[in-house]
Image: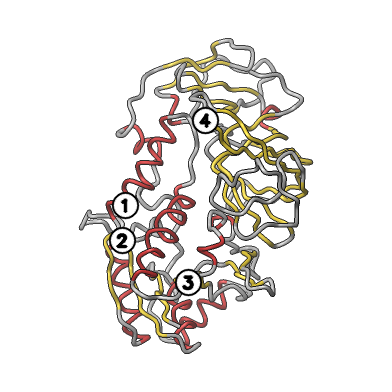
Amino acid sequence: MRVLAAMSGGVDSAVAAARAVEAGHDVVGVHLALSRMPGTLRTGSRGCCTIEDSNDAWRACDKLGIPYYVWDFSERFKEDVVQDFIDEYAAGRTPNPCMRCNERIKFAALLEKALALGFDAVCTGHYAKVIDDGNGNKELHRAADWAKDQSYVLGVLTHEQLKHSMFPLADTPSKAEVRAEAERRGLSVAKKPDSHDICFISDGDTRGWLAEKIDMSTGDIVDETGAKVGEHPGANAFTVGQRRGLKLGTPAADGKPRFVLEIRPKENRVVVGPEALLAVDEIRGIRISWAGLPIQEAAFAEDVADLTGEPAVLLRSQTFDCMAQVRAHGDPVPATARLELRTDGSGGVQEELLLTLREPLRGVAPGQTVVLYQGTRVLGQATIDVARSLARPVL
């Protein structure tokens, strides 16, 4: 099988490529150039896709004896990931750029180009598993090492993309074993630190970076009753659940800290309140996609259209049980879900996922991604549009 190995320059992708070679596949390595800033270098363990990473990827491919290429995806990355990040924050939402990168770059643009060039699959160092259900249909599942499991950030993958995805690290019990294997193979990245934070914000100062991209102005910080308790330099730089950096002039009556409950960009207002009000038990999601074929059989009505481009899961209004996860390493909670159709302001119709959580979650923000599971299997995902407590009045 002809396999294109996406080489990030880290230890995971290097070992994944090595295993693909060892399995007898015809492997070609490719590093994605996502920035045109030639001076970009790694600082500590922050970021990824830098010049240093490109050199590390080349050295790994050279050691494995496979061809190596660099593909310039910088314009696509700038438009589909960086600009989306800015636009979402400008709208008062909290985006996940890693989800967008996997969705639009690594498993859309990259896979599309790979298939056009005659490759059968794209191989990455993600910790996740693709399983055949016995009928030739692919399912996405959690990796063996739950501590490193990355199925959450792959929840955006579709059935067609899963058919051409290869994750050789799926059954690896720990990251320590991957590093030990890299050292045995003589790969120079064996002890390279993991990347973290947002790759295009190298110093980790998201607020400062956004301040240069979004017009911000001073506005009011109000409590849950609407009373002004402080001022902010720009509502868009805050996120739901935030505690630090509020600089409130009026302390709470009980002396306890306040947290950001809502961001209202149209009013340029931030709503704060006690920690207890962060708990939500209902989530409404949009931009839904399914990571596989239908979860269970259902008789479909004639007017049930597939608005997502993927097979529908269940009849709309019919509920199903699942586990809901809203952060890459967050704990999933039990929930019931159903699909609904909603008319938007322009008269169009969109599909909406309604989730009722059996255990409340704290600090859930619009713009985040909720990924649904049944057991270890990823069902699909949605972008959170509304998160609220059924017992709390609208603020």
Per the image, the residue denoted by label 2 is: 50
Q: Is residue 267 above or below residue 182?
A: above
Query: Residue 51 appears at what percent x and percent y?
Result: 27, 64
Q: Is residue 228 above or below residue 366?
A: above
Residue 76 is labelled as 1
Per the image, the residue denoted by label 3 is: 12
Residue depicted at 67% across the width and 57% down the height: 294
Q: Mark 4 near mark 1, Cβ–Cβ under 8 Å? A: no
Counting residues from the start of the chain, the first of labels 2 and 1 encountered is: 2
Q: Amino acid at mark 2?
A: Thr
For the residues marked 1 and 3, what is the alpha-carbon distance in whole angstroms?
24 Å
Q: Count residues near mark 3 (Cα–Cα under 10 Å), then give few for <14, some for 14-19, many for 20+.
A: many
Element carrying mark 2 = loop
Query: Residue 393 appears at what percent x and percent y?
Result: 71, 19
Q: Amino acid at mark 3?
A: Asp
Q: Count residues near mark 1 (Cα–Cα under 10 Å), then give few for <14, some for 14-19, many for 20+.
A: some
Per the image, the residue denoted by label 4 is: 348
Residue depicted at 41% across the width and 30% down the height: 90
Q: Is residue 235 above or below residue 153?
A: above
Which of label 4 and label 1 is nearer to you?
A: 4
